[in-house]
Amino acid sequence: MRAFLVLLAMIHSKLLLGLLCGIALGYFAWQQPFVARGHPRNQVISYDVAGYYAYLPMVFIEQDLHLAKPWKYPMIELVGVHEHPESGGRHLKFTMGMAYLYAPFFAGAHAYTLLTNPAEAHGFSMPYRIAIGLSGVVYALLGLVFLRRTLRHYVPDAAISWTLIAVFLGSNLFYYSTYRGAMSHGATFMLSAMMLYHGDLWRRREQPWRLLLLGLLAGLLVLIRPANLLIPLTVAGLFTLDGRLPKGLLNTKRLLWAVALALSVSIPQLLYWKLSTGHFLVWTYGEEGFFWTQPAWVQGLFSWRKGWLIYSPIAAFMILGFWGLARKKPSWALIIGLYLMAHAYVVFCWWAWWYGGSLGSRPMIDAYALLALPLAVFFQRILEHSKPWLRRLSLAGVVVLVLLNLAQTQLYCARYIHHDSMTREAYLHVWRTWDFPPAALLEAPDYQAALEGRSARY
């Protein structure tokens, strides 16, 4: 183990990125989520992803903004089509932020399919599935690239390497970058990392144009998921509230231009809602909503059903890192700490705090780029300031948690870990037998109680 830890410490973070790229692409090719194995849906364009993605075939293939006709492929019934209660207009449930990011991959798949098999150019055949699945892998890996570029200004390379390993291989980000990479979380991780990178260079190099780019990134983050507004606010706080902002770099005119660019990203969404429902702003989730006085803190963090710290225990090191970050950059520790509490509060106030079928608490992935900052400081202190026995113990613990996460990922892909009904007994049974848990050990959530905010929601 000691020799293995020494070897890891010697791997340059740039080389490590190549290794992580190979692992992610290899796992994607091995699992083949784009294939429907005895199931009407594949694991790429299905469930939420189908709803994010449907804007592209709706506009560029079907020309059916009002969702009024049968599509060439019956996936239209699975993408989350809602009817507006006042106008009766049919509209897609999800916003179109992810469709922006899918667009280059969709265009490539569509051109290829038109050339090779025009009859299958309906938007849901195999080339589209592979392309959209690959988009998730690419965006998550790009997030690691930008994260590394940011961290190299603050911590040594060895700490960066350990941070990349822990964030990617040690958490549920790995699952949501490969098997279910087309979900929004890997893309949010990338955009957050890009905001950190460009925010840092905006201040470090005093380049005003980067503020405009930050506005575009912020607009896209919010369009993907409105609750992501907390991310640009946090990044803004990190680079303006610690007293190190060069004089004259930020003024009212530049800020207004950045805000205008952020808002411009949502114009197509507002126009789509207006055309389909007669209203510029629409609550698209029907009876689903938040219960602001009933956050499921304990369940969201520690439950066997979906607990963040149960299924991604590496997050404990992210939290431990706040102690070191508070000593190194107190204002950053305060700002990121407040963000983490606010983000967790919003996440666990949602009616279905377990977020349907998912590996652990998937919305917490959206915080990983910011939480990588305290995590990197944790590794720096362990590598540079701790006693040898504590350093070896801590790093060995990280390796164990990485292996645990990879094993849990495989168990979830094999469906041994149930998508929404796990209990402590079922979890232990899976590990003892490496098999499906008996139905008697599972406890399905009460979805109706959750929608109504009753105590059975927990």
Image: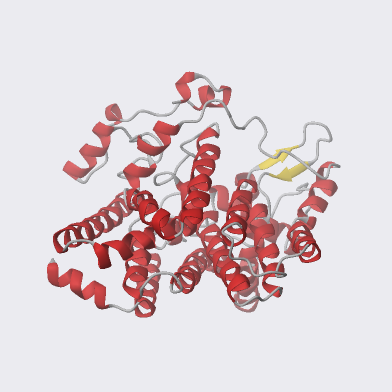
Residue 290, percent across and down?
Answer: 60, 32
Q: Is residue 157 left or right of residue 212?
A: left
Residue 108, percent across and down?
Answer: 61, 75
Q: Is residue 422 left or right of residue 41?
A: left
The residue at the point 64 percent across, 50 percent down is: 229
- Work out whether 209 lies above or below 393: below
Q: Is residue 417 left or right of residue 336?
A: left
The residue at the point 70 percent across, 63 percent down is: 215
Depth check: give the residue in front, 113 or 141. Answer: 141
Depth check: give the residue in front, 377 or 437. Answer: 377
The residue at the point 50 percent across, 36 percent down is: 348
Quarter containing the C terminus: top left
Quarter containing the N terminus: bottom left
* Image quadrant where residue 25 sits: bottom left
Instruction: Tell me the colour scheme of the image.
Output: secondary structure
* Image quadrant where residue 56 sits: bottom right
* Image quadrant where residue 428 sits: top left
Depth check: give the residue in front, 250 or 344. Answer: 250
The residue at the point 42 percent across, 53 percent down is: 326
Residue 11, percent across and down?
Answer: 28, 77
Q: Can see residue 33? A: no
Q: Can see residue 336? A: yes
Residue 321, percent across and down?
Answer: 36, 54
- Work out whether 218 lies above or below 352: below
